[in-house]
Amino acid sequence: MIHEAGLTIWEFSLLLALGAFLAGLLGSLTGLGGGVVIVPMLTLLFDVDMRYAIGVSLLAVIATSSGAAADYVREGFTNVRLGLFLEMATTAGAISGAMLALGASANVIAVIFGAVLLFSAYFSWKGAPTEHLETKPNRLATWLRLDSTFPTPQGPQAYIVQHVPVGFALMYLAGVLSGLLGIGSGAVKVLAMDRAMRLPFKVSTTTSNFMIGVTAAASAGVYLHRGYLDPGLAIPIVLGVLAGATLGAKLLTRGRPELLRVVFALVIVAVAVQMIYGGIRGTF
Amino acid sequence: MPARDKQQEEPAAANVGEKVEVWLASLLRAGTLLAALVLLIAGALYLARHGQDAPGYAAFHGEPAELKSIDGILREARSGNREALVMVGLLLLIGTPIARVIGCVLAFVVDRDLTYVVVSLVVLAGLLFGIVAS
């Protein structure tokens, strides 16, 4: 553990910026997002209080989501109608989650965090599923005009959205986790869109990224008023993650490295176990 | 509507809706860049003054009252408080996705798409509730 005692703010900030840069780089290269490792890094490695860690992690999540949105939308995969429709659920969830975080003990948050990390690692391990395009129209999706097309080498491919209420409920859960833990909840969002609503994988991931910033902005307001957003921590973390994620997105055009994804998933499992163990022992 | 100006530059976008999306995404990127720039400058000022201090994040103290509200931050920033200047960068960062939702409201109004005007207004109300009501 790198304890802040004995360090000046300069030295501490440089170490944080380096860690955040790596988190942003790996998060973007593996598709897991940088947010899932910021809170464990700050609390386990740098001995930062959980509340400061959650607050600054959420800011990093907003920065990476907004910064990457332009690339995604230009590719033509993002379904903006669907994203906005589901954001009604995620923003409501995010505010509930942030309110929950104000009352919950740091140890309880750590255990929930560990469980979500395990789920994200499992999700990353399985990778992209085979495509399963539905042809049966869904009445609610048709009424809301959620069906759309996505570009393929053979031209635009139409898709039909399924199970809208289930997806909506899962999105509320994703919002709660985002507000409670200071993460983007990308894994739960993709689960809702990909598995429940039967969207093509690329459309799920890009629409999820499109939504993450809005979800996080909803709980950031709550955190601001409670004094969770610290300027001294935000400088190295936000700038570091943003730089790392930007570099990661540039490198990604050469393909997603399979080995790195596996290694990062293993690291996340180890971190998850430590979060759960520490939370149960009450060390947070 | 800004999408019309982009018609020649964006041949990939097939319809007006998609061009609005591209425009809104550029707005997000511009907002993020602006926030990062403010963070960089205000951060340098902050580190120049406090760089040699000892960090104190192991225990939670919460931010001082003047950095917990938007008007407090703006007031302090005007009087040159360096922490408040950093917070202005953070407000820009948080404001960027909110600006995108406002952009969606306007785009759907122009499209006369009433359902999605309502949907984006509900999202906007949720965001403003998080910032104002707590």
Image (cartoon, grey):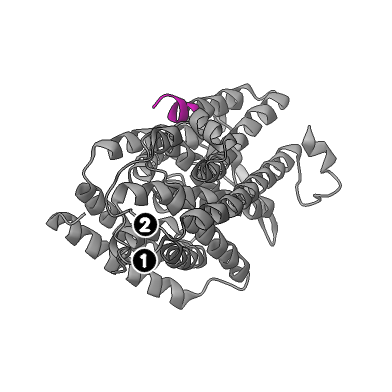
- Of B116 and A34, nearer the camera is A34
Disc sitting over residue A7 in the figure: 1
Q: Quadrant of the C terminus of chain A?
A: bottom left
Above or below A230: residue A261: below
- Residue A35, by quadrant, is bottom left
Above or below A34: residue B116: above
Residue at 38% over, 40% down? B63
Assess whether mark 1 and mark 2 are in contact (beta carbons under 8 angstroms).
Answer: yes
Provide the chain ID for the residue under circle 1: A
- Where is residue A11? Give x, y as percent: 43, 67
Task: Give the magenta range.
Answer: B128-134
Above or below B88: residue B118: above
- Where is residue A48? Give x, y as percent: 31, 56
Q: Which residue is mark 2?
A: B55
- Of B12 and A115, nearer the camera is A115
- Where is residue B11? Give x, y as percent: 81, 51
- Residue A283, by quadrant, is bottom left
